[in-house]
Image: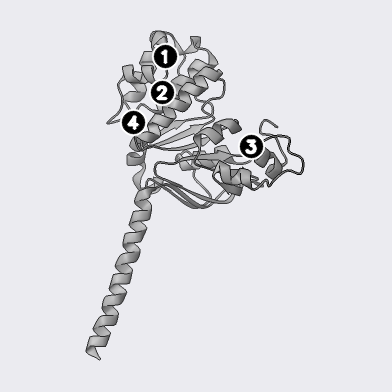
Amino acid sequence: MRDEHSGATACRCLHFAFCILNYRMTVVVTGVICTNLIKTYGDLVAVDRLSFQVPRGECFGLLGPNGAGKTTTIEILEGLLEPDAGEVQILGLTWRANERELRQRIGVQLQETQLAEKLTVEETLRLFRSFYHRGRTVDDLLGLVELESKRQSYVGKLSGGQKQRLAVACALAGHPDLLFLDEPTTGLDPQSRRQLWQLLGEFRTQGGTILLTTHYMDEAETLCDRVAIVDHGKVIAEGSPRELIATLGAPRVVTHQGTLEDVFVGLTGRHLREE
């Protein structure tokens, strides 16, 4: 009887240890975990029990019409907003317990980044680089976003596209493990968009994780391993762009190849730029 009891106890201990190990491995390999997020503003439910996960090394796209809850969600994940309910883990850590460490390990490009217009481009990058214990040099950052010729230009004198590229350089200043990009290529010309795509590809080859929102479906198809389509604060579809396009089925009359934009409009009934 004693041997049977000892054996059963050993089995339970092993099972418990395996569960703990499995949980820790999940945390280590997951960049973002959000579970049942809720955020309300009065009677408006901006985020409604939204859940998804982003493995480390993946580029994940959060897509949806204006007002769908994308920016609210990403600001919660960035630690800028407190959810009313739900759980968030970033790189295995929580904002409540590990804010200082997380600030050192993430990069953020906001939808409307407001930079000091009376600083030069170089001064702006030196300022952002000073916030981090580790990171790239100012020269490296200027080269990454091709703003070397604007080094001594005031931010207020830059074009919209140049300001956007500067905002991305600021997000990369701390050599982050996880990059949050909220509509990163808005206002960029086609050549600058392609250059930024290449830069984000290089970031991922070095083990970086990306969570982005975008209004460009071709961008999501090119960059993202998986996407979640959000409407009314809920995830209504999730998968790789190829998987979601496959759900369209074969058209009765072949007019064009199915695209992620077809999936989006079919699911939400709305175009991305609709107000």
Q: Which residue is mark 3?
A: 259
Residue 117, given in percent of the width and then of the height, sits at 47, 14
Separation (CA) of disc 3 from disc 2: 31 Å
Separation (CA) of disc 2 from disc 4: 10 Å
Examine the rendered structure and indicate whether residue 121 appears above or below residue 215.
above
Q: Nearer the viewer, residue 215 or 69?
A: 215
Can you tell which mark lies on residue 175?
4
Separation (CA) of disc 2 from disc 1: 10 Å
Q: Secondary structure at mark 3?
A: loop
* Mark closest to the chain's N terminus, 2 or 4: 2
**Direction from residue 74 to residue 17 in the image, left or right:** left
Q: For the residues carrying marks 3 and 2, which lies nearer the camera in this image?
A: 3
Q: Secondary structure at mark 1?
A: loop
* Mark closest to the chain's N terminus, 3 or 2: 2
Amino acid at dot 1: Leu
- Whether tag 2 and tag 1 are in contact, CB under 8 A, the answer is yes
- Whether tag 4 and tag 1 are in contact, CB under 8 A, the answer is no
Q: Secondary structure at mark 2?
A: helix
* Mark closest to the chain's N terminus, 1 or 3: 1
Badge 3, how many Cα within 10 Å: few under 14, some, many 20+? Answer: some
Q: For the residues carrying marks 1 and 3, which lies nearer the camera in this image?
A: 3
Amino acid at dot 4: His
Separation (CA) of disc 1 from disc 3: 34 Å
Q: For the residues carrying marks 4 and 3, which lies nearer the camera in this image?
A: 3
Q: Which residue is mark 1?
A: 147
Q: Nearer the viewer, residue 135 or 77?
A: 135
Q: Which residue is mark 2?
A: 169
Q: Secondary structure at mark 4?
A: loop
Separation (CA) of disc 4 from disc 3: 34 Å
Separation (CA) of disc 4 from disc 1: 18 Å
Q: Which residue is rendered at x = 26% and y = 81% of the image?
A: 7
